[in-house]
Image (cartoon, helix red, strand yellow):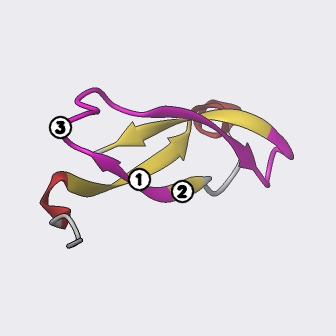
Amino acid sequence: MGKKAKGDRIQVILECTEHKESGMPGTSRYITTKNRKNTTQRLEVKKYNPVLKKMTLHKEIK
């Protein structure tokens, strides 16, 4: 069994939406990958923000 080519997977950056609005310095960002063919829309995932110390919504940025 051979491996599938990685041509469909792309690297994306997720940025916290609440941190931007709070006005606090710094940002909360995560790097992940997604399959371009299966997920055509932008990702929205709940992740932990260490500055705000709670789970927040992180959206994909370009």
Work out whether mark 2 precedes mark 1 in sequence or the reverse, and give the earlier one.
1
Q: Quadrant of residue 1 in the image?
A: bottom left
Give the residue drawn at x 17%, y 37%.
Answer: 37
Mark 2 and mark 1: Cα distance apart in space: 6 Å
Work out whether mark 3 precedes mark 2 in sequence or the reverse, and give the earlier one.
2
Magenta residues, start to end: 31-54
Give the residue drawn at x 25%, y 56%.
Answer: 10
The magenta stretch spans residue 49: yes
Write down the residue under mark 3: 37
**How far across and how far down the image is residue 34, in percent?**
34, 48
Mark 3 and mark 2: Cα distance apart in space: 21 Å
Which three-letter amino acid code belongs to the residue tagged 1? Ile
Write down the residue under mark 2: 30
The quadrant of the image that shows the C terminus is: top left
Q: Is residue 54 left or right of residue 26?
A: right
Task: In the rendered structure, find residue 22 and report the number of the disc placed on it.
Answer: none
Q: Is residue 21 left or right of residue 9?
A: right
Q: Quadrant of residue 39 in the image?
A: top left
Which three-letter amino acid code belongs to the residue tagged 2? Tyr
**How far across and how far down the image is residue 4, in percent?**
19, 64
Q: Is residue 25 left or right of residue 2?
A: right
- On screen, residue 40 above or below 34: above
Q: Residue furthest bottom?
A: 2
Q: Is label 1 or label 3 in front? A: 3
Callouts 2 and 1 close, C-beta under 8 Å: yes
- On screen, residue 7 above or below 18: below
Which three-letter amino acid code belongs to the residue tagged 3? Lys
Write down the residue under mark 1: 13
**How far across and how far down the image is residue 5, in percent?**
15, 66
